[in-house]
Amino acid sequence: MSRKKIVAGNWKMNTNLNEAIDLINILKTTTKQFSSIEKIIFPPFTFLNTAAEVLKSETSFFVGAQNCSEHAKGAFTGEISAEMLNSIACKFVLVGHSERRTYFKETNEQLVSKIQHAFKNNLHVIFCFGEVLEERKSEKHFDIVKQQLENVLKNFSEKDLDKIYLAYEPVWAIGTGETATPQQAQEMHAYIRKVIGQIFSTKAAENISILYGGSCNAQNAAELFSCADVDGGLIGGASLKADDFCKIIASF
Ligand code: PGA
């Protein structure tokens, strides 16, 4: 079967308003020719509305939020709800990013609740997971990834998977300049598909999109994307440079 090709850019806590507007406008123009590839950008909350406005007539270029609250609404100072995101034409939300798990101590329970709120509000989810260096060194990476998937996804149905992309992001590769080799990425992505097959079905495993994230850049994207089970990338640092992001999109 042929799955979608996807390139997503996680801007993290970078850019100011002018920089964000420039970047969005450049990307809108330069990525036009890649209409068969789904592009998603995840700017900071403050620029989401602008991004959604600029990209509103695009059919293959969407806007997502880097996080959402695990609560529906109410007295949660500083939080942003899935309903708010949906109301500004945001289509996606990242859940489970390692920086949220590590710095903000997000638990599996919270991740499940965030995904439930996202679904209730018509948002699609990119669910992120991956092992830390110690876990890889001690060869626990497959078990860890399996647990991360099972703990969260067992709370959802096979139908729900239509609204989820997976992003395998080995934590040792995020922002470090060290990338998983294409062999390591392929091996893990094939394993992830096997786990999805065990939790749900072979059909679900074949259909789900699995992105690779972790120091993916204009130089290594082509090799990574050529792996049979890698359906695209979740890009951090390199997504802030329009040229690099474009080259990554052109790498398929
Ligand atoms: P990086 O970040 O590409 O800068 O390593 C990836 C991510 O955190 O999604």
Image: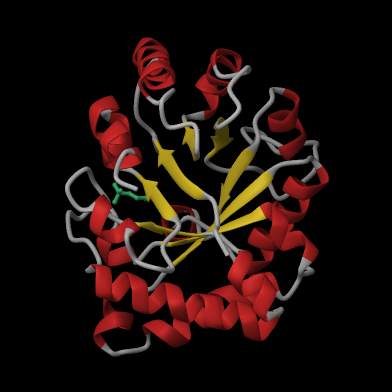
Using the rendered image of the protein, determine whether residue 215 is visible from the camera's viewpoint. no
Q: Position of residue 238 (x, y in %)?
A: 26, 39
Q: How many marks?
A: 0
Q: Position of residue 150 (x, y in %)?
A: 63, 78
Q: Quadrant of the N terminus?
A: bottom right
In this view, the residue farthest toward the front is: 1
Colour setup of the view: secondary structure
Q: Is residue 173 above or below residue 163?
A: below
Q: Is residue 120 left or right of residue 142?
A: right
Using the rendered image of the protein, determine whether residue 24 is visible from the camera's viewpoint. yes
Q: Is residue 206 left or right of residue 113?
A: left
Q: Position of residue 148 (x, y in %)?
A: 54, 74
The residue positioned 64% from the left and 60% from the top of the image is 111
Q: Is residue 78 left or right of residue 112?
A: left
Q: Position of residue 104 (x, y in %)?
A: 49, 54
Q: Please tell me in which quadrant of the rendered image residue 161 appears.
A: bottom right
Residue 201 or residue 136, whichever sits in front: 201
Q: Is residue 188 above or below residue 15?
A: below
The residue positioned 61% from the left and 73% from the top of the image is 205
Q: Is residue 217 left or right of residue 199?
A: left
Residue 78 or residue 140, whichever sits in front: 140
Q: Is residue 241 above or below residue 162?
A: above
In this view, the residue farthest toward the top is: 18
The residue positioned 46% from the left and 81% from the top of the image is 191
Residue 131 or residue 183, whichever sits in front: 183
Q: Please tell me in which quadrant of the rendered image residue 201 appears.
A: bottom right
Q: Is residue 198 above or below residue 166?
A: below
The residue positioned 31% from the left and 34% from the top of the image is 245
